[in-house]
Image (cartoon, helix red, strand yellow):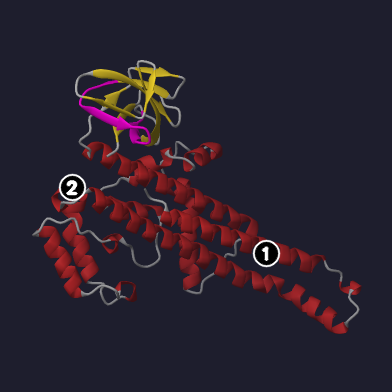
């Protein structure tokens, strides 16, 4: 499932966190040094110059921090779109089987991208490639989507813009994303979970976009303190982990709805991880994965478990095969709720 974009973003977040710590520690050390403790006149003059310039350096450090953090985030969003599109076309082979939003908006997205081929961002694409992609999708019914259809230009990935990008991919982020951790727990801790206004829930992301645009246009008039900037870094990491979890859930939902394997109810549950199920025309082996659909109202809605044991009539086995209706007990890798339903992953 989706992981590469998030892993890279977390590594970038770690690097900017370490940079903030370096800036803070460096400033503290310079301020704390007593000029009279130095014997060299040259060293005293250098120290005095450093102390005088600390406030000036705050502007350059602030600009660099804002540009770096937003740049990491923009790269994450576009890499995440790329990962999602790749996963989508691996699951759905025919263009006509896509979500209605993808089909309805496809030509407008194609046309918009075609008009941007002169941009450096899309220099790797040619008009002939786009025409071939259009032909393959609309005539040959191949699901040859490319992530560039869904990118946003101009460095403005506010929450509403991100929602719009994924809406073209048939995903409604705006309503349910806040129900996923870690943002859900964060909103609850702040007492704003029930808020629906984007400006309240996603204020730090939207403000970062505005600040980035100010810096890019030379208007960095409002300097943010490093201690407060760390809150922005923390929030964006939570946001990235949450949207990644949300999209993985949507991919699991596609697997659930698109798979040919039957839905299995849990007949009995023992020790929270051993499920007794009644099946027919059924094959399963130790090591197989099952897709789990959670009871309504639970998030994430889907998850996976590994089958770590199979037991029939108190006899352990590595594989279970039946053509008639029969009952078997499966030991799963982690706990499960009795109201969950299962499907074996192909």
The residue closer to the viewer here, 51 or 9, is 9
Residue in view at x 15 percent, y 69 percent: 131
Residue 284 in picture, x, y percent from top left: 30, 31
- How packed mark 2 is, by other alpha carbons closer than 10 Å (few <14, some 14-19, many 20 or more), is few
The residue closer to the viewer here, 115 or 253, is 253
Residue 322 in picture, x, y percent from top left: 23, 24
Residue placed under numbered mark 1 in the picture: 22
Residue placed under numbered mark 2 in the picture: 100
Residue in view at x 41 percent, y 56 percent: 158
Which structural element holds mark 1?
Answer: helix
- How packed mark 1 is, by other alpha carbons closer than 10 Å (few <14, some 14-19, many 20 or more), is few
Q: Is residue 209 above or below residue 119?
A: above
Residue in view at x 84 percent, y 79 percent: 44
The Cα–Cα distance between marks 2 and 1, rounded to whole angstroms, is 50 Å
- Magenta stretch in the rendered image: 278-294
Q: Is residue 244 visible?
A: yes
The residue closer to the viewer here, 214 or 179, is 179
């Amino acid at each position: 499932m989706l992981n590469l974009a998030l892993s890279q973003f977390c590594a970038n977040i770690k690097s900017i966190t370490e940079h903030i710590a370096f800036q803070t520690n460096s400033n503290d050390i310079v301020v704390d040094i007593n000029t009279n403790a130095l014997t060299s006149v040259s060293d005293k003059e250098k120290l005095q110059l450093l102390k005088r310039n600390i406030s000036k350096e705050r502007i350059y450090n602030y600009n660099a921090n804002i540009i770096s953090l937003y740049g990491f985030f923009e790269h994450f969003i576009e890499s995440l779109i790329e990962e999602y599109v790749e996963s989508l076309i691996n699951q759905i082979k025919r263009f006509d089987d896509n979500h209605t939003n993808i089909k309805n908006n496809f030509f407008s997205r194609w046309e918009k991208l075609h008009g941007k081929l002169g941009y450096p961002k899309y220099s790797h694409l040619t008009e002939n490639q786009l025409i071939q992609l259009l032909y393959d999708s609309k005539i040959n019914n191949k699901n040859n989507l490319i992530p560039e259809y869904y990118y946003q230009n101009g460095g403005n990935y506010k929450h509403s813009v991100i929602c719009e990008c994924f809406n073209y991919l048939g995903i409604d982020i705006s309503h349910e994303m806040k129900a996923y951790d870690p943002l859900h727990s964060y909103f609850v801790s702040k007492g704003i979970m029930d808020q629906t206004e984007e400006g309240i829930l996603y204020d730090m992301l939207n403000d970062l976009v505005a600040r980035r645009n100010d810096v890019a246009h030379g208007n960095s008039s409002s300097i943010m303190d490093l201690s407060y900037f760390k809150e922005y870094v923390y929030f964006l990491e939570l946001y990235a982990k949450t949207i990644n979890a949300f999209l993985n859930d949507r991919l699991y939902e596609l697997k659930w709805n698109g798979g040919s394997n039957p839905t299995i109810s849990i007949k009995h549950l023992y020790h929270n991880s051993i499920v007794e199920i009644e099946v027919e025309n059924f094959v399963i082996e130790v090591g197989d994965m099952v897709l789990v659909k959670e009871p309504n109202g639970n998030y994430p809605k889907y998850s996976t478990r590994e089958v770590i044991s199979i037991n029939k009539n108190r006899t352990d086995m590595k594989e279970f095969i039946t053509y008639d209706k029969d009952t078997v007990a499966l030991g799963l890798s982690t706990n499960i709720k009795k109201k969950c339903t299962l499907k074996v992953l192909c």
